[in-house]
Structures are given as C-alpha cells and as structure tokens.
Image (spheres, rainbow, N blue to C red):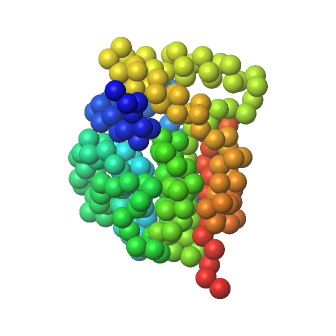
C-alpha cells in the first residue's frame, strides 16, 4: 500500500480525534492553551475594523472563530477547516452566535475572492499543512491591503536547557495524556509535526516571502508557542 500523503494523514488524525480534541488540548498544554489563544484573539480584535470580516483558517473545533465572534459581535467571522468531523463540533459549540459561519475548505486553496477579509488567522494548524508558504500566500491574498495575517503555533523551544525536557514530555507523555491508549498514535503524529516544523525565525522569514510587511513575533513558554503576524502592503 502506498504511503499516505501528509494531507491524508492529518485528515485521518483529526477525523478520529474530533470528539475529544478540546479536552485533550487542555490536558496536554497543562491548561496554558487558552492563554496562548487569548494572545491571538486580543491581537485580532484590536486591529480588525468595525463591521469587517475575519477568517479563521484550519479552524478545527472553532475555538478561535467562536471567541472572536463573541468578543466582537460586530465582526463577521468565517471558520474554515477541511475536516467535516471537526466542523461538526465547531457548529454545535458556535450555535448561539449569529455572526460566525463555517465552511469546509482547503487552506492551500481558499475558496474566497481576493481582498475579502480584514484579517486572517491560523492557530496550531500551519504545521499540519503540506505547503506553509502556499497557505500564507493564500491568507495574504484574501485579506484587504493593510489587513493582517496571524499565525499561532507550536515550536521546538529556543532554550537548550528546556529543549530536552520538552522533547521527553511531548514525545512520551503528551501522546498518552492527550489520546490515551486508544488515540496515542494520533497524538504521536502531532508531536512529530511540531518537530518537523520551521523554527520561529524561519517562519518570520516566510511571512516576508508571502509578501507581508511589518512582521512581528511574540514568544511564550521559552518559545514553545509563538504568535507571528504580518501586514499586507497597502495599494500605492
């Protein structure tokens, strides 16, 4: 049997863990995930114009999209993901909110016209895509000139002192803590995707290759979680 592509592997993982994904994230991040996501939510809310549209790419179970819609009722938020099972969970969680919609789609081929959104964000999803630059280029394409692109994701920590402890935890403890015996293989894959991901400076450079300016990054937990952002140049 031919080896599965990265896209196929990720699709299978998220289809299988959709029902337990939220609770597992809280456990494996030791409760810190919500604070990391708050940094992204605050950044988007501060810069999004009143009444504008915001896109959450690789929305998963919808935490970011739902929080944006709840914090800013004036925004029109779209949550996009390629996993129907994850979107089913997101729809149920987001039912009370009228200003968020869900759409199945591919992060590397966003089904939107150019210059549609005032901001586009992706959280803990870029590392699971097959072409990081293509995703960033697509996000830049669909935001308006002067709009922002954000990425919150996991990275191997910068500190050589912290890195060995991080490696032991995420390779051996995290899969069992997140998936138990039933889904430990799926969470081992998620650990692998972080190991294979870019370093934070490389991602900042990639934002530049995607045509974004005013690039910035903010690290948490010794660089294990980093928020990157960049702006689409205004039309001259």
121 vs 214: above or below: above
Res. 229 in view: yes
Residue at figure coordinates x 49%, y 45% from the top left? 130
Res. 36 in view: no
Near-viewer residue (195 or 227): 195
Which corner quadrant of the image does residue 169 belong to?
A: top right
**Residue at the limit of the structure toward the front, as seen here:** 1
Residue 234 percent across, percent down from the top left: 62, 78
Residue at figure coordinates x 35%, y 50% from the top left? 81
Residue 150 percent across, percent down from the top left: 56, 56
Residue at figure coordinates x 24%, y 55% from the top left? 96
Quadrant (top left/top right/bottom left/bottom right) for the N terminus: top left
Q: Is residue 171 left or right of residue 178?
A: right
**Residue at the limit of the structure toward the right, as seen here:** 160
Near-viewer residue (133 or 228): 133
Quadrant (top left/top right/bottom left/bottom right) for the C terminus: bottom right
Near-viewer residue (155 or 93): 155
29 vs 110: above or below: above
Which corner quadrant of the image does residue 187 belong to?
A: top left
Q: Is residue 41 left or right of residue 155?
A: left
41 vs 28: above or below: below
Residue 200 percent across, percent down from the top left: 67, 44
């Amino acid at each position: 049997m031919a080896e599965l592509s990265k896209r196929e592997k990720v699709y299978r993982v998220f289809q299988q863990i959709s029902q337990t994904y939220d609770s597992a994230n809280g456990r494996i991040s030791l409760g810190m995930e919500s604070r990391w996501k708050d940094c992204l939510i605050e950044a988007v809310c501060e810069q999004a114009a009143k009444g504008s549209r915001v896109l959450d790419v690789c929305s998963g179970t919808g935490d970011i999209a739902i929080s944006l819609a709840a914090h800013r009722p004036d925004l029109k938020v779209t949550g996009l993901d390629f996993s129907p099972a994850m979107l089913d969970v997101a729809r149920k969680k987001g039912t009370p909110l009228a200003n968020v919609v869900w759409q199945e789609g591919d992060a590397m081929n966003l089904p939107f016209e150019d210059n549609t959104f005032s901001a586009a964000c992706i959280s803990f999803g870029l590392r699971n895509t097959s072409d990081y630059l293509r995703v960033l280029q697509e996000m830049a394409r669909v935001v308006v000139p002067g709009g922002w692109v954000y990425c919150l994701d996991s990275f191997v920590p910068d500190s050589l002192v912290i890195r060995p402890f991080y490696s032991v935890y995420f390779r051996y403890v995290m899969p069992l803590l997140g998936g138990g015996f039933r889904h430990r293989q799926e969470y081992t894959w998620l650990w692998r995707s972080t190991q294979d991901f870019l370093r934070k400076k490389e991602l900042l450079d990639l934002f530049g290759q995607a045509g974004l300016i005013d690039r910035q990054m903010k690290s948490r937990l010794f660089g294990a979680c980093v928020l990157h952002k960049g702006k689409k140049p205004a039309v001259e």
